[in-house]
Image: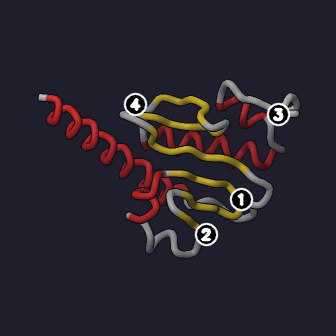
């Protein structure tokens, strides 16, 4: 019975699925992530826009009342104080859709994840040698 389920092949397709106001938020969020992680590759994973660089960096998604950002548990834990006003869980943050997103903070989180993924990739290489 899942034949009506929409599947996305690109982030552009995903964004176009939402009302204009939400599309603008998603476009800006995408731009902020691209600027924070210029070498990252875009893809759709778990039917969400995803950026990867030496593994998954961050996913994001739009919902009726919030924008979800998924920077892995470390990306939430390392910014616990700055994120205290937002609903969060293990590896997830919910930004209310009716309030401005904290793009500077999101950029810091993405940059943190880039450094973290580079370190993990380097550690993996060292173990192989």
Residue 1 rendering spot, x and y as whole percentages: 88, 33
Residue drawn at x 75%, y 53% as measured from the top left: 63
- Compared across the picture, whether 93 is left or right of 72 comes to right
82 relative to 24, above or below: below
> How would you rate the neighbour count of disc 2 (Cα within 10 Å): few for under 14, some for 14-19, many for 20 or more?
few
- For the residue pair 74 and 114, the one nearer the viewer reads as 74
Camera-nearest residue between 71 and 15: 71
User: How many callouts does the rendering have?
Assistant: 4
Q: Nearer the viewer, residue 124 or 16?
A: 124
First reached walking from the N terminus: tag 3 or tag 4: 3
Residue that mark 1 sits on: 66
Instruction: Report which residue position mark 3 lands on.
Output: 5
Residue at the spot x=62%, y=45% of the render?
A: 28
Task: Measure the C-alpha gap from mark 3 to mark 4.
Answer: 32 Å
Mark 4, residue position: 39
Check disc 2 and report the residue beneath it: 87
Residue at screen point 66% across, 47% down:
61
Crowding at mark 4 (Cα within 10 Å: few <14, some 14-19, many 20+): few
* Quarter the C terminus occupies: top left
Q: From the viewer's perspective, is residue 14 above or below residue 111?
A: above
Residue 29, percent across and down? 60, 46
Q: Gap between marks 4 and 1, in whole Å?
A: 27 Å
Residue 101, image x, y percentages: 62, 59
Query: Few, some or many C-alpha atoms within 10 Å of disc 1 (few <14, some 14-19, many ≥20)?
Result: some
Camera-side residue: 17 or 88? Answer: 88
**Badge 2 element:** strand
Distance between the alpha carbons at the discs numbered 2 and 3: 28 Å
Q: Secondary structure at mark 3?
A: loop
Q: Which quarter of the figure has residue 30?
A: top right
Q: Nearer the viewer, mark 3 or mark 4?
A: 3
For the residues bearing labels 1 and 2, Cβ distance under 8 angstroms: yes
The residue furthest top is 9
């Amino acid at each position: 019975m899942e034949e009506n389920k929409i599947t996305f092949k690109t982030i552009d397709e995903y964004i176009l699925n939402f009302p204009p106001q939400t599309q603008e938020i998603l476009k800006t969020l995408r731009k902020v992530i691209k600027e924070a992680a210029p070498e990252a590759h875009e893809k759709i994973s778990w039917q969400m826009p995803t950026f990867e660089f030496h593994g998954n960096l961050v996913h994001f998604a739009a919902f009726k009342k919030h924008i979800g950002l998924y920077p892995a548990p470390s990306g939430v834990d390392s910014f616990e104080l700055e994120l205290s006003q937002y609903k969060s869980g293990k590896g997830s943050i919910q930004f209310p859709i009716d309030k401005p997103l904290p793009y500077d903070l999101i950029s810091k989180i993405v940059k943190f994840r880039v450094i973290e993924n580079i370190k993990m990739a380097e550690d993996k290489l060292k173990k192989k040698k």
